[in-house]
């Protein structure tokens, strides 16, 4: 048996033990048992909202424990395969392939272990605003909304449209969606910042090259049980008439809500629900999420000197460039991660590479 393969197999086992400890594998297995016992109680679904949160928590735990269990089983099978290869050299190729597969799986799970922030397990509220670039920017904002939605669908996450304000000519002025699934916020929070598109404008009769900007803001969807300190007297509420599609009730009632947290100048809007009461409740949920994000950024700034390399983020910083002209490519300004296919990023299939590269950067790891 090749000595290098033996060494790689030992390294896999060591990494798996370290990973299990860092993710508290044993503790999460016990948590799953407790939740499943709780779900077996006849009164479990009496409080539907609480039950749904518990189900989501179980799904999040299983998204870590399940792959770890599978990997542990595969590592034991690998040991048996190596013993067989000692007696039959023709199996050596199979051993090499299995080792490579397990190394890839470990890489993916080790990335998950980096999602250890206080809100990383939560859902994400993603808000996209058109910036400089005229109608092209409005169209670009809509394209980004579709990109994140496609990625979420591919990850089997749930999406809820919270707010969408159409532009009169094309695209959107802004929109907000909730993305719900295991570690949704942990993965998406690195998307906050300015996204730049360069292309031949479809809205310009002279077919000139146009640069457009859209700003993405990402906040954790905070559970009501988590206390966020917001003084209501610091919040101004404005009511206005909803715009866009929505039936006769739109443009006849002041159902849309805008909340402004005056000390931080944080603004959220919601007009997508059917009633003013629903819009107000959703807007407050969005405001709590924004304030949680501000608090998280403050804590990150306090420990910034602990990082050798700072990953530049923020609502105003340009984080990624997307090109449709003169060639098709997407490159991240922070990590250097590059994809030579514009469409494969926009359809969500290759967005994960950018998310993973940012996680490695924040952890001080090379991609």
Image (cartoon, rainbow, N blue to C red):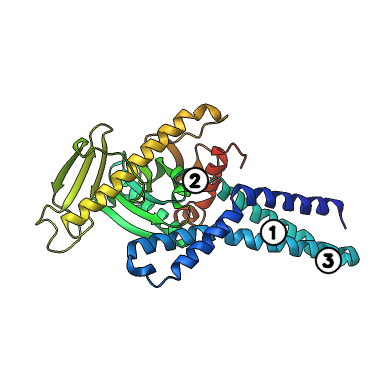
Q: Residue at x 88, y 58 (%)?
A: 1
Q: In this view, does 296 lie above or below 187?
A: above
Which mark is drawn over residue 337? none
Circle 2 is placed at which residue position?
Answer: 330
Q: Which of marks 2 and 1 is in front?
A: 1
Circle 3 is placed at which residue position?
Answer: 91
Which mark is drawn over residue 101? 1
**Which quadrant of the figure contains the C terminus?**
top right
Query: Farthest residue toward the bottom?
Result: 42
Measured Cα–Cα span from mark 1 to mark 3: 16 Å
Measured Cα–Cα span from mark 2 to mark 3: 41 Å
* Mark 3 surroundings within 10 Å by alpha-carbon count, few (fewer than 14), some (14 through 19), many (20 or more): some
Q: Using residue 178 as the reference point, say whether residue 321 is left or right of it.
A: right
Closer to the chain start, of discs 2 and 3, is 3
Q: Using residue 136 as the reference point, say whether residue 95 is left or right of it.
A: right
- Residue 31 can be seen, yes or no: yes
Closer to the chain start, of discs 1 and 3, is 3
Total numbered badges shown on the rendered structure: 3
Q: Which residue is drawn at 45% across and 38% down?
A: 319
Closer to the chain start, of discs 2 and 1, is 1
* Mark 1 surroundings within 10 Å by alpha-carbon count, few (fewer than 14), some (14 through 19), many (20 or more): few
Q: Do residues under tags 2 and 3 come within 8 Å of each other at their CB atoms? A: no
Q: Residue at x 10, y 55 (%)?
A: 253
Whole-percent x and y of residue 345?
Answer: 48, 53
Query: Farthest residue toward the right?
Result: 87
* Mark 2 surroundings within 10 Å by alpha-carbon count, few (fewer than 14), some (14 through 19), many (20 or more): many
Q: Using residue 104 as the reference point, say whether residue 244 is left or right of it.
A: left
Circle 3 sits in a helix, a strand or a loop, which is it? Answer: helix
Whole-percent x and y of residue 326?
Answer: 47, 44
Q: Which residue is drawn at 35% across and 50% down?
A: 225
């Amino acid at each position: 048996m090749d000595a290098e393969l033996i060494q790689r197999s030992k390294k896999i086992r060591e990494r798996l033990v370290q990973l299990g400890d860092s993710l508290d594998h044993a503790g999460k297995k016990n948590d799953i048992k407790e939740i499943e016992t709780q779900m077996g109680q006849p009164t479990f679904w009496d409080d539907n909202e609480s039950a749904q949160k518990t189900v989501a928590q179980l799904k999040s735990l299983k998204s870590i424990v399940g792959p770890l269990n599978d990997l542990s089983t595969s590592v034991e099978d690998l040991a048996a395969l190596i013993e067989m290869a000692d007696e039959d050299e023709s199996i050596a190729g199979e051993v090499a392939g299995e080792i490579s597969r397990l190394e890839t799986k470990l890489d993916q799970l080790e990335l998950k272990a980096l999602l250890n922030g206080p809100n990383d397990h939560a859902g994400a509220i993603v808000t996209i605003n058109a910036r400089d670039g005229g109608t092209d920017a409005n169209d670009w904002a809509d394209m980004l909304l579709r990109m994140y939605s496609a990625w979420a669908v591919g990850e089997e996450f749930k999406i809820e449209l919270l707010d969408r304000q159409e532009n009169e000519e094309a695209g959107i002025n802004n929109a907000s969606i909730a993305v719900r699934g295991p570690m949704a916020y942990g993965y998406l929070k690195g998307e906050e910042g300015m996204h730049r598109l360069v292309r031949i404008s479809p809205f310009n009769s002279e077919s000139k090259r146009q640069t457009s900007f859209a700003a993405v803001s990402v906040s954790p969807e905070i559970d009501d049980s988590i206390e966020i300190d917001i003084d209501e007297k610091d919040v101004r509420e404005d009511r206005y008439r909803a715009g866009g599609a929505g039936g006769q009730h739109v443009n006849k009632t002041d159902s849309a809500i805008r909340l402004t947290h005056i000390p931080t100048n944080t603004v959220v809007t919601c007009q997508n629900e059917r009633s003013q009461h629903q819009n107000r409740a959703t807007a407050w949920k969005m405001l709590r999420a924004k304030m949680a994000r501000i608090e998280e950024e403050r804590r990150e700034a306090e420990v910034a000197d602990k990082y050798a390399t700072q990953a530049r983020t923020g609502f105003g910083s340009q984080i990624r460039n997307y090109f449709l002209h003169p060639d098709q490519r997407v490159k991240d300004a922070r990590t250097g991660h590059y994809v030579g296919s514009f469409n494969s990023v926009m359809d969500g299939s290759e967005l994960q590479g950018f998310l993973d590269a940012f996680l490695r950067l924040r952890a001080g790891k090379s991609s």
